[in-house]
Image (cartoon, rainbow, N blue to C red):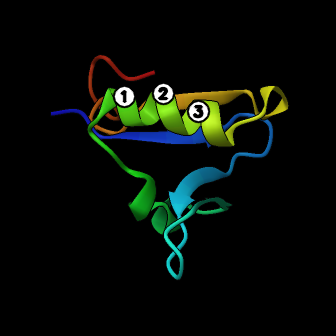
Amino acid sequence: MARYVIQSATSGRFLAADLEGGEPCWVQLLQQAGGGVTDDPERVAQLLADHCDPEDFAQVIDLDRLGTVDDY
């Protein structure tokens, strides 16, 4: 099962759920992005459509590919 997180290539920030309200917001550290990790590609697509601007150059990272032969 893949675990996806959205990262802005422009700022390096990650899209994650706000700890207080649950609304997605951009956070600086991957450590803070736990609420933004999802295994649902449809959820990723919806987050991209709703919360990412073209100037973010948002990229979807599969955390399970990192450190493997299929790494980015």
Residue nearer the viewer, 50 or 12: 50
Residue at 26% of width from left, 39% of height from top?
39
Marks 3/2: CA–CA distance:
5 Å
Residue with the mark numbered 1: 42
Q: Secondary structure at mark 3?
A: helix
* Badge 1 density bin: few <14, some 14–19, many ≥20, Cα 10 Å: few
The amino acid marked with disc number 3 is Leu
- How far from the left and from the top, in percent, is residue 68? 27, 27
- How far from the left and from the top, in percent, is residue 22? 49, 69
Residue contact between numbered discs 3 and 2, judged by CB atoms under 8 Å: yes
Residue contact between numbered discs 1 and 2, judged by CB atoms under 8 Å: yes
Q: Secondary structure at mark 2?
A: helix
- How far from the left and from the top, in percent, is residue 21? 53, 76
Marks 1/2: CA–CA distance:
5 Å
Kindly indicate the quadrant of the structure image that contains residue 10: top right
The amino acid marked with disc number 1 is Glu
Q: Farthest bottom residue?
A: 20
Q: Farthest right residue?
A: 55
Q: Farthest top residue?
A: 70
Residue nearer the viewer, 34 or 64: 34
Q: Earlier in the sequence, mark 1 or mark 3?
A: 1
Quarter of the image for the N terminus: give it.
top left
Residue at 50% of width from left, 78% of height from top?
19
Residue with the mark numbered 2: 45
| Residue 34 falls left or right of residue 1 | right
* Badge 2 density bin: few <14, some 14–19, many ≥20, Cα 10 Å: few
